[in-house]
């Protein structure tokens, strides 16, 4: 433990950089997801007032609903757009320069949404939400690439876990800031929407002084001297010969390979198993149902039989619980391993959602069951936060090398954003048509993912990227249940 803490102190610069980079990435994502529900009545009032002033008649309810749904969904549309362009931009201009671009986009979004009420224009809210989504989609992709490449192997999972930590911190602070005692009022809601853009001023000032990543400098630019300088700035003035040798091996293996496009990634038969795992892991995050609970948290807790007056504070407690769980995962990810956390997290979620379905069905018969429902929902969120929420992106980043990782993270980000949008659209219909059985849909998707992970995903903890690739290219069987366990089904997957 003492050695672990001393290593953390030695590499504290990397973790400081991870936090600053995350302010313009997953922190923004989490914050914008949670604040939009608190600003909802005020934005709809702005739409109605603006319409009345322009056309001298109140807007029809159907038109108001359409405009509001567009304002909510344009965030995801911007996210998909930013994700798709991230591979081209990062390859051409470098990851550090792309991060600077993200902070500029977020500052512009903050200015646009922050002045929308003063200008009397709901279109400015729409534009600001799109810019937030575009910057968030680009930022999340670049953040995953940048952190995976600046982190030393020993702390690669821990560094990447800061992405999930900051996403949950963003959700919690968004819920906190949205309370009517703080910024959730008619006069201050523009400041609520602009808060994340103002937070982006910190990375805007700091990121230009960050180094480019060692793999980018050596493998893509061929700059050995620049790579060594970056390593010394990031990891101290020790002996980095092993890390350089590993990068040189990767460079030699990729000598005839250029950075892949998304189409090339899907066509490459040697990466078929990694791509399938990437798709399953990415799709399961939104289909696990936790994002649906956050999107419609008021409806979910109301259906659970809770007092409406207390709902904002119950939801704030849920966010605090989520954040605390991520912090726990932050410290255990390098000890337990990624595969174990995914299996335990999704496995517990399946059992809890089955229990939640039974509890929802019987809540009218027992007065104390609504409190059990809330407790189970909290446990579902904890299971998700400790495992899948924090581990998914690090695992996906570790499954691919320098040439294929940008394309893989583009696909991952697009799937996450699209899944987020889909769940936001479908979840209220599931509640309406399936009632107390709505969570069975998410339970089914999570169960399928659990079996795929158990069968095909190897443990990536403590392995170099080339070692992980050899796990897929050199099938072997192991009966042990240790962190180095290679699933038996992997041999079948590699021959697809």
Image (cartoon, rainbow, N blue to C red):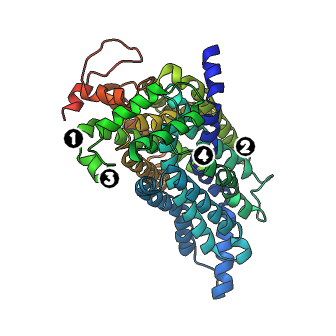
Image quadrant holding the N terminus, namely top right
Residue at the spot of label 1:
269
Image quadrant holding the C terminus, namely top left
Residue at the spot of label 2:
313
How far apart are the two marked residues, 4 and 1, measured between alpha carbons? 36 Å
Of the two numbered discs 3 and 4 in the rendering, the one whose residue sits closer to the viewer: 4
Residue at the spot of label 4:
210
Structural crowding at the residue carrying mark 3, measured as other residues with C-alpha within 10 Å and reported as few (<14), some (14–19) or many (≥20) = some
Residue at the spot of label 3:
261
Going from N to C along the chain, the mark reached first, 4 or 2, is 4
Image location of residue 396, percent across then percent down: 41, 37
Structural crowding at the residue carrying mark 4, measured as other residues with C-alpha within 10 Å and reported as few (<14), some (14–19) or many (≥20) = some
Of the two numbered discs 2 and 1 in the rendering, the one whose residue sits closer to the viewer: 1
Q: Nearer the viewer, residue 443 or 15?
A: 15
Question: Secondary structure under badge 3?
Answer: loop
Q: Are marks 2 and 3 in contact (CB under 8 Å)?
A: no
Going from N to C along the chain, the mark reached first, 3 or 1, is 3
């Amino acid at each position: 433990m003492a050695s672990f803490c001393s290593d953390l102190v030695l590499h504290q610069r990397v973790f400081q950089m991870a936090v600053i980079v995350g302010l313009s990435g997953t922190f923004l994502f989490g914050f914008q997801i949670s604040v939009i529900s608190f600003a909802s009545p005020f934005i709809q009032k702005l739409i109605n007032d603006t319409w009345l002033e322009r056309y001298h008649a109140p807007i029809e309810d159907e038109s108001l609903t359409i405009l509001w749904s567009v304002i909510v969904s344009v965030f995801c549309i911007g996210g998909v757009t930013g994700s798709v362009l991230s591979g081209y931009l990062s390859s051409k201009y470098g990851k550090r320069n792309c991060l600077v671009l993200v902070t500029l986009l977020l500052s512009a979004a903050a200015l646009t949404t922050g002045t929308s009420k003063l200008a009397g224009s709901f279109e400015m809210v729409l534009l600001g939400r799109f810019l937030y989504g575009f910057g968030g989609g680009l930022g999340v992709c670049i953040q995953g690439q940048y952190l995976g490449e600046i982190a030393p192997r020993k702390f690669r999972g821990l560094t990447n876990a800061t992405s999930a930590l900051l996403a949950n911190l963003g959700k919690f602070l968004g819920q906190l800031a949205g309370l009517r005692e703080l910024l959730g009022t008619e006069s201050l809601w523009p400041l609520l929407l602009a808060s994340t853009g103002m937070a982006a001023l910190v990375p805007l000032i700091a990121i230009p002084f960050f180094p480019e990543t060692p793999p980018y400098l050596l493998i893509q630019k061929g700059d050995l001297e620049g790579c060594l300088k970056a390593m010394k700035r990031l990891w101290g003035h020790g002996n980095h010969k092993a890390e350089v040798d590993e990068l040189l091996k990767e460079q030699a293996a990729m000598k005839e390979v250029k950075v892949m496009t998304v189409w090339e990634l899907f066509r490459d038969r040697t990466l078929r198993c990694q791509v399938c795992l990437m798709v399953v892991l990415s799709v399961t995050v939104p289909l696990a149902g936790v994002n649906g609970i956050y999107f419609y948290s008021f409806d979910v807790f109301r259906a659970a039989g809770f007092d409406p007056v207390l709902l904002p504070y119950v939801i704030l407690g849920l966010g605090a619980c989520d954040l605390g769980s991520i912090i726990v995962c932050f410290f255990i990810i390098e000890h337990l391993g990624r595969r174990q956390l995914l299996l335990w997290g999704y496995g517990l979620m399946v059992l809890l959602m089955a229990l939640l379905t039974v509890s929802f069905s019987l809540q009218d018969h027992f007065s104390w069951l609504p409190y059990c429902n809330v407790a189970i929902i909290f446990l579902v969120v904890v299971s998700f936060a400790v495992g899948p929420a924090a581990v998914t992106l690090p695992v996906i980043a570790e499954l691919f090398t320098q040439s294929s990782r940008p394309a893989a993270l583009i696909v991952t980000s697009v799937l996450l954003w699209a899944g987020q949008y889909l769940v936001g659209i479908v979840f209220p219909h599931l509640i309406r048509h399936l009632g107390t059985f709505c969570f069975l849909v998410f339970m089914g998707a999570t169960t399928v993912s659990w079996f795929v992970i158990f069968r095909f995903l190897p443990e990536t903890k403590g392995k170099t990227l080339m070692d992980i690739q050899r796990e897929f290219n050199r099938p072997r069987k192991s009966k042990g249940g240790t962190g180095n366990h290679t699933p038996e089904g992997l041999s079948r997957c590699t021959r697809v």
